[in-house]
Image: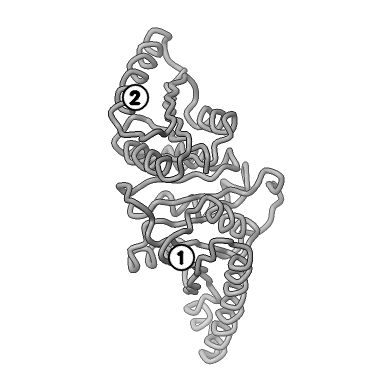
Amino acid sequence: MQHILVATDLSERAAKALRCGLRLALRFGARLTVLHVVDADQPLNIRDEALHRSRAWLEQEMAARPADGVEVSVEVIPGTPDATVIEIAERDAADLVVMGAHRRHLLRDVFVGTTIERVIRGTALPVLLVNREPEAAYGKALVAVDFSDTSERALSVAAGLSFLEAEEVVLLHAFQSVDRAVLAAGGADPKLIEAHAIKTAGEALGTLRRMADRHAATDASAVTLRTLLEEGPAVAVIERVVSHEAIPLVVMGSRGHSGVLRWLLGSTAESYLRTTTTADVLVVSPARAAETDEDEPPAQM
């Protein structure tokens, strides 16, 4: 990891992201860019005053933090937050974008999404959402997979960024075999329902283990992955495992849908981003060459 971009709105939520970005830069000896975007859609005198005050505050803030030789630059730019973050990150070839948990406005977000969601949708760069106070290192990580190419990419990118150099990495797949209640109400044989569930679980476990084996065969760091299979809705399963095992980092792939299809289907990654407050989340989007608008059904997570 050579270049980290931290996007901040100067809030306390974003301050955690700033501290995390600096910690990662110190760990990897990476260059650090701290970016604040001032809303360009306001009177020029107000905008210019905001630019001046924000730059002065950020430069003073970064000067007070021990950088230990890390190259730190501050950029304060007028524009639209998500578009400007994407533009600067891609212009400067950042390896990672770090952002804090932005304030959630329920009604507005239903229609337009949060800033971090729009950044994730608009770039193929990995994005780290910081919810926790930064620690020395992530001692444990959970990688949520749905067996898609996007999940394979998320696993590979996380490993390449050394995010999986943890004491323990859990490779989690959540599956839903059948709606037991509906089938039972329809008079289906309980033994057949259970047999189908067992068969589905066995097939999923085999695929999960093969995925772990493929990663182990290509990962030079030889990180040991523990596979975990759970039945239930993806977001609920992830939340349960994270809470039960006190996992500080979740790695997820974001589906490559766009436009109306994304609005209709949503994304497990985005749903989890909206609910979690306990774990940091590294979201890896599909590579640009692999993005598609095809109306493919969403895979199980």
The three-letter code of the residue at mark 1 reads Val
Residue lying at 39% horizontally and 7% vertically, measured from the top left: 45
The local crowd at label 1, few if under 14, some if 14 to 19, many if 20 or more residues have their Cα within 10 Å, is many
**What is the residue that sits farthest to the front in this orientation?**
69
Return the mark for residue 169. Answer: 1
Q: Position of residue 82 (x, y in %)?
A: 50, 32
Apparent side of residue 83 relative to residue 239 in the rendered image (left or right): right
Residue depicted at 59% across the width and 59% down the height? 151
- In the rendered image, is residue 172 in sight? yes
Q: Nearer the viewer, residue 106 or 163?
A: 163
**Left or right, 266 with reference to 279:** right
Q: Is residue 101 visible?
A: no
Q: Position of residue 68 (x, y in %)?
A: 36, 35
Within 10 Å of the Cα at label 2, are there few (<14), some (14-19), or many (20+) other Cα atoms? some
Task: Name the one closer to the observer, 117 or 19.
Answer: 19
Give yes or no for contact between labels 1 and 2 (Cβ–Cβ under 8 Å).
Answer: no
- In this picture, is 99 found above or below 171? above
Which residue is under mark 2?
58
Q: Who comes first in sequence, dot 1 or dot 2?
A: 2
Residue 275 point in image, percent of width and height:
38, 53
> Helix or strand or loop: what does disc 1 sit on?
strand
What residue sits 49% from the left and 39% below the top? 97
List x then y, in percent, for residue 300: 57, 65
**How many numbered dots are placed on residues in this image?**
2
Q: Residue at x 43, y 9 (%)?
A: 44
Query: CA gap, disc 1 to disc 2?
Result: 35 Å
Residue 155 placement: quadrant? bottom right
Q: Nearer the viewer, residue 169 or 242?
A: 169
Look at the picture and state if 119 lies above or below 254: above
